[in-house]
Amino acid sequence: MRIRRKFLQLTRQTVPYGYELDLKSYLPKGYQTDEFGNFYFTIGEDFTTMFTCHLDTACKYHKPVKHVQSETWIKTDGTTILGADDKAGVTVLLWMIRNNVPGTYYFFIGEEVGCIGSGNAAKFGHFKGNYDRIISFDRRDVSSVITYQSSSRCCSDDFADALCKELNWSNGLSYKKDTGGVYTDSAEFSSIIPECTNISVGYYSEHTHSEYQNIEFLQSLAEASVLVDWENLEIKRDPS
């Protein structure tokens, strides 16, 4: 799997809420669908980590995307959004799955229209007591490990510091704690899972026709994510 090639495939067309099934051919063989329409995949048995991304894009219409790219950047011709939010996250999760990183991988629907898939899963699913940490790969820029989403604490500083250290020791990354997160899928689980965060995946100007993706960064993040000792990141936050 090549990161650039997979990202280009995933962003060949915009995927508004309701069209997420169009991407099922890119999901790993053996994926499952929950009762809320989300897709998930599990590797291993003895783990307490969940990784997430979302499949929909922030648009109303299902349209072909015309890519414009350089060695570092991928964008569109300006007639559509790119959909890096959150196909960048999808790309990272597929890379981690390919490299057999243990955990539950969730591909949520409807994040851009109110976290529909994750909200239903958190409210009616069976997650409480089964997971210690949930990481959403869905944040602009290249350096954020989010500790607050919409001004509410979602993960501890200790956890964020440990994750930054793990990500930064290789591939020249420079993650740091960020208290300015907006609401995304992992926040839906903040009352039942101790450490809920959202990390940068290298897109910019999301939700606009000027959206673009740092594809070199995405490659580095994917490679670094395979090396993180996810299960031993310390847990400090009390979700209650």
Image (cartoon, rainbow, N blue to C red):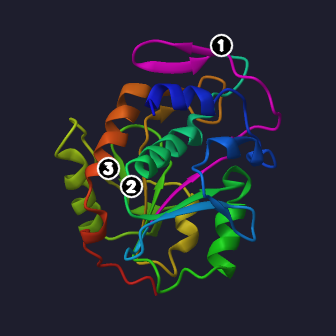
Left or right: where 41 falls relative to 60: left
Residue visible at 75% across and 68% down? 36
Residue ID at (76%, 23%): 64
Q: Residue 133: x, y in percent? A: 40, 71
Question: Separation of disc 2 and disc 3 at Cα?
Answer: 8 Å
**x 24%, y 41%: residue:** 174
Q: Which residue is mark 1?
A: 77
- Which tag is nearer the camera, tag 2 or tag 3? 2
Quick one: 160 or 229, which is closer to the camera? Answer: 229
Residue under pointer 3: 226
Q: Could you tell me which residue is drawn at 38 percent across and 69 percent down?
A: 155
Above or below for 150 versus 122: above
CB within 8 Å, label 3 to label 1:
no
Q: As drawn, is 136 to the left or to the right of 10?
A: left
Does 233 sit left or right of 222 as displayed? left
- Dot 3: within a 10 Å radius of its alpha carbon, few (fewer than 14), some, or many (20 or more) residues? many
Amino acid on which disc 2 is placed: Asn
Q: Is residue 56 visible?
A: no
Q: Which mark is residue 100?
A: 2
Between the C-alphas of marks 3 and 1, the distance is 33 Å
Q: Earlier in the sequence, mark 3 or mark 1?
A: 1
Q: Which residues are magenta?
A: 50-77
Q: CA distance from mark 2 to mark 1?
A: 36 Å
Identify residue type, mark 3. Answer: Val
Magenta residue check for 65: yes
Q: Is residue 101 magenta?
A: no
Density class for disc 1 (Cα within 10 Å; few <14, some 14-19, many ≥20) is some
Q: Quadrant of residue 238?
A: bottom left
Instruction: Give SS at disc 3.
Output: helix
Dot 2: element: loop
Residue 175 is left or right of residue 70, and the answer is left
Judge depth for marks 2 and 1 and give the one in front.
Answer: 2
